[in-house]
Amino acid sequence: MQKLAEGRMIAYASGNFGKALVFGGADITMLFLLTDVLGLGGTMAGWLMLAALCGDLVFDLVAARLVIRLRHAGKGYRWMVAIAATPCALAFALLYAIPAFGARQLWVLAAALLVFRGAYAVVDVPHNALMAQVTSDSRARGRVSGYRLFFSTASALVVATLLTPLVQRAGSNQAFDRLALTGVAAGGLFAVTMILCAWTSGSGASRQARQTAGQDGIRVPLRDPMVIGMGLLALLTGFAAPAFGRMLLYTGRYIVDRPDLVPTLLMALTVGQFTGVILWTALTGRFSKSVLLAMGHGVSASGLAAFSFCLPWPIALIACAAIIGFGLASVFMLPWGLLADAVDVVEWRHGRRFETGLFAYYLVIVKASGAASTSLIGWTLGWLGYVPGQPQAIPVQAGMIGLGIGIPLLGSLVAILLMRRFDLGHARHGRLLVLLDRRCQSGADPVSGLKRGLVKSSGAGVTSAGGWALSAQARQSMSRSMDAPAAVRS
């Protein structure tokens, strides 16, 4: 049984290979493709990414509402992932075929970008929400987070060795046909991966999740401390952490003056992530996910600081990139495990399981902040006087360093402070699951809105200290004062 559960978690996590291939590949190369391949100015490219930001604010919420309606109709997350995979693959292929078609009108570029991100949202929301059902154990969710990043990092190898060099060559010698074929191949691989993921991951929904499927919604309790904390974490994870990778193409070409070094730096970043996945995943059984996430940000910040000091020595940058990747493994993998736990915490506090809603809420902030970061990069480069393909002035180079190193370094320091407010460990989450399971078995009516505690409940309940509450009044008191849900201190 244990092997079957572990196999289901790995099958679910394999979907991250396909997702990282298309979304991660676009995230790293899209701004460079717009400026150095299609010839847009940095400011105009920034406005295009702002359009993507506005789209993400809508797409994930629309996708979440669609998923909730389909769940009410008996169609689960896996069904949605399998159905939406092919349209998303076609949208990605179209995005990288635009240079070959010679379509450089602004509205065409904006439409292609929005179609891709909208199609991706329909796959991304149900796949991420499925994590809360694959397993309910806090330690197991840490392992699933590691498995997810393992497949994402394997995909990053493909991006580093194939997609990024092709985009670079397309900018220098107009290899548009090969770029378009690569987009078709990557899109096809994405579709196959997601369909197999949905087929093999099995139905891991817990009794509790099945019974509360009808309560899901996108109007999450925004004033809840846990929801606020996850929103801040999403902002840092989407805006600050990936800025280093987004600027590598510019750093290698215009700061280090070694564009040939970029694939090597991306490879070192990926190798560091592989190593980090193994270690951070192994540590999830002993330490809470919030502690490990803070440690990962600390390692990443150290690597970024070293990278800034080693700019005159290109070879030393490879080791720095590996250190950064090692830290980023924790930064990118563990928030998803924390989010799955947050679904349980919010359910206990509010008597309603906002499963799809909370994952959509997190995704909206991550993607929108990521698009905002890319827009900021484009606007800043345009404001500083960046000219594609030409030697850059000192202010432009300084701006590139600030965008690629300063932003993620500051983000890591803020994230470390934020993680001090999270205190949901494995034991506390385990006690919370016992309480939720007992409430589910007792047939207690869920509490609507923002009211805390239980209403019309009966039977015995277990407090976080292991005691017994035999009355409805005692259980209501317990729901207000219990330690387990205090995952984020207000």
Image (cartoon, rainbow, N blue to C red):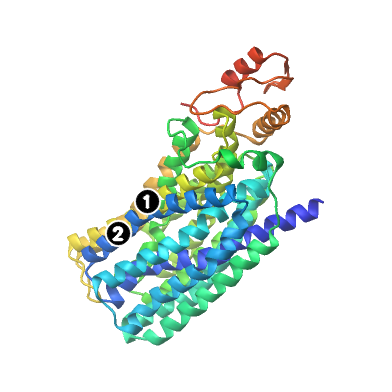
The residue under the point 36% across, 57% down is 308
Which picture quadrant has residue 426?
A: top right
User: Could one spot residue 240 in this view of the protein?
Assistant: no
In 3D space, how far apart are the residues under numbered discs 1 and 2 (Cα atoms)? Answer: 10 Å
Task: Identify the amino acid type marked 1.
Answer: Leu
The picture places residue 54, in percent across and down from the top left corner, at 32, 54
Classify mark 2: residues with Cα within 10 Å, few (<14), some (14-19) or many (20+).
some
Residue marked by disc 1: 57
Q: Nearer the viewer, residue 77 or 48?
A: 77
The picture places residue 310, in percent across and down from the top left corner, at 39, 61
Helix, strand or loop under label 1: helix
The picture places residue 423, in percent across and down from the top left corner, at 56, 32
Which picture quadrant has residue 52?
A: bottom left
| Image vertical order of residue 70 relative to residue 101, above or below | above
Which callout, 1 or 2, points at the residue further toward the start of the chain?
Answer: 2
| Image vertical order of residue 402 relative to residue 84, above or below | above
Q: Nearer the viewer, residue 354 or 243?
A: 354
Residue marked by disc 2: 51
| Image vertical order of residue 80 relative to residue 64, above or below | below
Task: Identify the amino acid type marked 2.
Answer: Ala
Q: Nearer the viewer, residue 83 or 327?
A: 83
Q: Residue furthest right?
A: 1
Q: Are marks 1 and 2 in contact (CB under 8 Å)?
A: no
The residue under the point 56% across, 74% down is 189
The tag on residue 29 is none
User: Could one spot residue 382 in this view of the protein?
Assistant: yes
